[in-house]
Image (cartoon, helix red, strand yellow):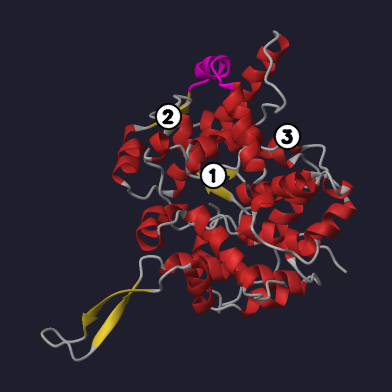
Amino acid sequence: MAIISEVSGKAGTELPKTWVEACTGASIPLPPTSTDIFQQVRESAANFINSQPEPALVKVNDQKAKDYIENLDIQKFTKYVKHVNNWSRSLPLVFDNMAQELNLIALVDLLQIGSGFRRELHEAAGRGASDTIVFGCMSLHISQTSIDAKGLQELNLGDISQHFGIPLFGKERPMQEGSTAVTISEASLLRPLAEIILGTLQDTGRRLEQAGFVSLADFIIKICTEKSTSAHLVTKLVAAFPSLRDASKVNGQQVYLFKKAQLIAYDVHQRFGKSDAKFAFPDIDQMTIFVDNVVPAMLQHHGLITPSQEIQSKIKDGKELSLEETTAMRAASIVAAQSVVDSATEAARSGLEFGEIPVCQATLDNFWWREGKEPELRVIPRLVCKKTVYF
């Protein structure tokens, strides 16, 4: 059975156009497989941020990192990281076997998208993007809908609407002004999100089947049997699936972010690493943050990054950022997170103790993501980017 080594073949004209347009990194060349993929993410982000012309889109405030570490609430940090690490264990579901559970967890992470529709989701369903995805995947499982490679390809837009609670149609209006005899429904503002979710699932199922894999879990198990490191799994995931090739080319520079692929590897390790050696990845601490819209908001709140006035105004007003602006916010967050990690390493050498949870980019991501759910911080405006399949 062949292991997928690169994104090959066309996505197919029948896949939703909205999804195709959201896969902005699908044609970006990947880093050489001989290099450390996590280091490539760190370096590409740093190169992009450090080479910005003035006025910079986003500035990283390195001098703040030391103060941040010295004032970090270790007890709160430990509590929040543990909470996020245990999300998959708290699912109120029964699984027939490990592969079935692994498949669902991987699909939840594959679909960690829709953050740009946060306001519309809360208005329509009372849930944010992440909760909407978990809700939908749980519904697929409980209803015994097939979510193997074949099953993913058979899903339709109605299925997505039903399981994820995403309305496809909005208000009705008269077809002819002054007459209510015949009305038509306008497309819901959330319909593009439903199309992106559908395209992600259909394309993933197609590529799995073409390569001879039964499911996403089957892919992960075989890749990790081949080599048990998170870097190897992430490298294979971003090469195989356009929906995970989270990269941008801005001003001639390639910027690698790979949020969801890293998240899949991290969650697989957290859930199964203690019970199955092939998922006990020794390089988890080398990952970068799984940067979305929450973490940049927290870093800005803590003074670790400073967006330009134009970006700040757009975020405050709920306006969409451009690809360049979005990339700058996310790349700056990775650079700032590394500065905090470096400060933590230096502080540890001087005798500062951080408890049982090590301070690395992955654990900082968990902490900042959970911190962003605090009521007083949840109201902080976040960047909006709707035309993306990556967060």
Per the image, label 2 sits on a secondary structure element best described as helix
Please state the extent of the stretch shown in magenta in the rendering. 61-73
Please say whether residue 360 is one of the residues in the magenta stretch: no
- Percent of width and height locating residue 138: 60, 64
- Percent of width and height locating residue 311: 36, 38
Q: What residue does disc 3 label?
A: 286
Q: Do the residues labelled 3 and 2 touch (CB within 8 Å)?
A: no
Please say whether residue 71 is one of the residues in the magenta stretch: yes
| Mark 1 or 3, nearer chain start | 1
Residue at 88% from the left image edge and 69% from the top image edge: 1
- Percent of width and height locating residue 360: 67, 29
Residue 361 sits above or below residue 210 on the image: above
| Mark 2 or 1, nearer chain start | 1
Residue 252 numbered tag: 1
Q: Is the magenta stretch mostly helix, strand or loop?
A: helix
Q: Label 1: few (<14), some or many (≥20) within 10 Å?
A: few
Q: Label 2: few (<14), some or many (≥20) within 10 Å?
A: some
Residue type indicated by callout 1: Gly
* Outermost residue to the left: 178
Residue 357 sits above or below residue 245 on the image: above
Q: What residue does disc 2 label?
A: 301
